[in-house]
Amino acid sequence: MTQWEQLLTTVINNVIGSLPKLIRNGFQSGSVDIPPYTNILLPDVVQYDTGQKSVLCPILYHPVDSTRLSLSNSRLNGMDTISAYGPVSFPIQDVSLSVPLILEDVVLEGNWTTYSQCQKGSASPIETIHSGSFVLHFTDIQFTVNIDLDPNAMTATSVNLKLTDVNQLWSNQPVFDATKDLTYDSRTSEGQKTVLAAVLNSEPIRKKYRESARKGIENNTLSDEMIKIINTLLAQLG
Amino acid sequence: MSNAAFMANEAIFNLLLEKFISSNPNDFRGNKSIPEIGTEFVFELNGAPVTDLSAQANGGNISLRFDHVQLQVFDYQDGKRHSLQNTFTVHLLMTGHVLLNGQNVSLTGLSASASGTDRLDAKAAKMVNETIIPQFQQKVAQIQLPDFSKLVDMSFQLNAIEVNDHRLTVLAQIGNTKGDPNFNVSLPAEPAIIAAIGSSVINEFAAAQFPGASASVGDKSSSWGFGYEGHAEAGADQPHVEIVNGQAQGTLPVWVSAKGGIEVLGQWIERDISVSLNTPPLNIRLVNDSNAKSVFIKVYLDGNISVDFGLPDALEKAAEGILSFIQPIASAITDAINVGLDKINIKAFTLPSTIPGTNFAANLSFGWVGFSGNCVAATILINQ
């Protein structure tokens, strides 16, 4: 390992070690002002077709189409549980480095809404809506941060965060406990809760949660902020 | 126009810079902390640089290679430095110009570059350029380079500077005489300076300090209307000394006149006496003071003056007596000249107790003193 790589290793390890605090509190140094990386708003999922004709209609009504699901106000927290679980490596000597990282507990929370077309006899279908909130946990998420440096200026030019799932836990995420993780509006019957829990815990929907969480983890905002933090450090050297 | 020269080797620059850096450590270290990331960088320029006095690729005439620049990374928490995380030794090359700034030799225009191949060297060079050099430019410019005036007890004017063959040569003018200093003295590997004074300077000082010499002898003997007499006078002025091909030589114009007379029946007959002079050459010797901290230049007559007299026929009858009166003129003028030459006392080289022009204590000694080319030269060794 070259001395430059040793220095980068030390610096990057310090950055990684400081990330939990920086993610919680933000980072301000000189002209660099980075806000906290918490409560990250994720894109809404709108009217996603679950492909299931769920029994969510009022009495005497029957479903005439598959239930659609929207996820709104989705927010990600827990990025401050980040840490490194392996050494810094240099795929390209001096100018490209890679750090295996792990997120201990990432929380995805938001609101869900289901839309079901229900029909009574030959009358025109009416839409039945159920809503509530969810709080989901993703644990031990493994990903890698790849950092490229400008070989001349020796500053970070790109930082990419990529979920690697080396421990193969990701595909089973989130761990779902309907009794704790979901809330329902007051009009929802116990039977409907059971149906809704099954819908919200179905693999297509769990995949939607994972996609949302992945966007938060691999977010360009976090990459950009890491570039700024690393360059702020390296700038101290000249 | 220069008639004296000083030559310094790279070792004395190494020594001076090491002394300067070690005595001003705070000027060559710095730290940068980033509390938010728990990191503090501490950099320190220490150790002796390796000086190269030669034309540099970037146009400078000096480079200083620092192989012991230390960069440390500390864990920094709660406004305090904690554990040392890593230490790096980087290699830097500073290039610049040694030039004559008025009557001082100064070091200017320093810039750093990497002398090693590790990218950290390049980063450190950037750090030094952006942080250390601007911060310490004034200090760097104040690095005390040898002040040669402390080595020669004569006032002189520095005229020019030359850097080549891994040595610095400064040309100087003492007094008003012309004469390019030409000498061939090797610089040793250890810190040393060669000081060389052209013989035209020595000649100028010798001529100015020589008070002149004169002597006269003579007497008369007379009895019952018969007698004889003889008188002689001599003088010497304007000595001329020079060093040619490492050999000192010189001349001193001496004149002697004599006359004699005889008395016959109370009548004196006087005649001039012809004189044939044999004047030895002048020479130069170098003298140490008692503690060998100064070297003086002395001029001396390398032998005795001898005089042959040719008496005219008219004086032959009393030749023996007349000659007895005038022959002492040879030793008389020799003595007078020696007294006059002894007044010449040229303090050529003197050794301060510090590296010349600095406050750094050092033990200076003469390594070699002698004549070389057309100069009197001294190798001055500087030991810590």
Image (tube, coloured by chain):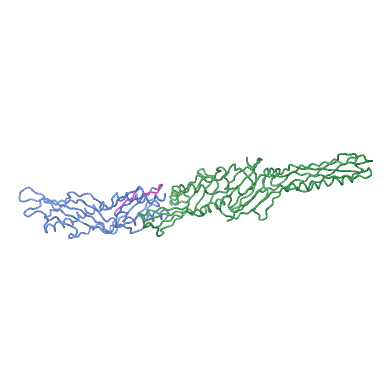
Chain colours: A blue, B green
x and y percent of residue B104 in the render? 56, 45
- Name the one closer to the observer, A54 or B51: B51
Relative to B342, residue A192 above or below: below
The magenta region covers A152-162
Residue B273, located in which quarter of the rendered image?
A: top right
- Name the one closer to the observer, B297 or B72: B297
x and y percent of residue B59 in the render? 51, 43
- Judged left or right of residue A132, residue B166 is right
Is residue B89 located in the magenta-colored stretch of the structure? no
Q: Main secondary structure of the magenta part?
A: strand
Residue found 65% across the figure and 44% down from its top: B182
Residue B74, located in which quarter of the rendered image?
A: bottom left
Q: Quadrant of the N terminus of chain B?
A: top right
Q: Quadrant of the C terminus of chain B?
A: bottom right
Residue found 59% across the figure and 45% down from its top: B170
- Name the one closer to the observer, B261 or B308: B261
- Name the one closer to the observer, A63 or B274: B274
x and y percent of residue B85 in the render? 40, 58
Residue B365, located in which quarter of the rendered image?
A: bottom right
x and y percent of residue B83 in the render? 40, 60
- Judged left or right of residue B52, residue B215 is right
Is residue A156 located in the magenta-colored stretch of the structure? yes
